[in-house]
Amino acid sequence: MQVKVDYVPEWHDVCAESDLVPNSGVCALIEEQQIALFAVKLEGEQKVFAISNWDPIGKANVMYRGILGSVKGDPVVASPLYKEHYSLTSGQCVEREDASVMVFDIKLENGRVWVAV
């Protein structure tokens, strides 16, 4: 008999939205996992993204220090180590099909940033 267990992420109040630096990253520790948060201005509106801070190629927690940009209209962060670009929406590495980072859901409520882990 196979038992299916659905994982339900838990929402965590991480910081005030005003704590985020526009067009830059910050790191948060949530349940012993480092999460890179990015506040990006897209089409005149600030959007917040959350990905794993772990660089799977460089093998270090450095993604929050990456450079933000876009590739074919998709917001990305370039790893500060080897410069691979990771989609902030899917986590997929642009240059390598075998590399990706985890992406976390974000919600903004009453000026607070919540991350589902």
Image (cartoon, grey):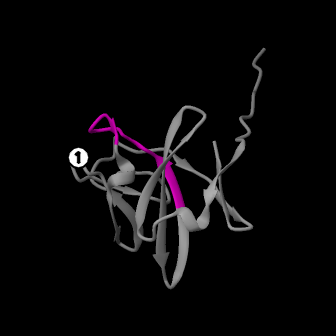
Q: Position of residue 53 (x, y in %)?
A: 43, 44
Q: Is residue 60 magenta?
A: yes
Q: Is residue 58 magenta?
A: yes
Q: Is residue 34 left or right of residue 109?
A: left
The residue range painted magenta reads: 49-61
Q: Is residue 87 left or right of residue 79?
A: right
Tell which residue pokes out farthest to the top in this image. 1
Residue to which mark 1 is pinned: 81
Q: Position of residue 57 (x, y in %)?
A: 28, 38
Can you say whether 64 is above or below 23 in the image? above
Of residues 75 and 5, the one nearer the viewer is 75
**What residue is rendered at 74% in x and 67% in y?**
110
Can you say whether 104 is above or below 61 in the image? below
Q: Position of residue 92 (x, y in %)?
A: 41, 51
Can you say whether 27 is above or below 39 in the image? above
Quadrant that contains the C terminus? top right
How crowded pointer 1 is (Cα within 10 Å; few <14, some 14-19, many 20+) is rated as some
Of residues 76 and 112, the one nearer the viewer is 112
**What residue is rendered at 51% in x and 85% in y?**
44
Q: Secondary structure of the magenta portion, mostly?
A: strand
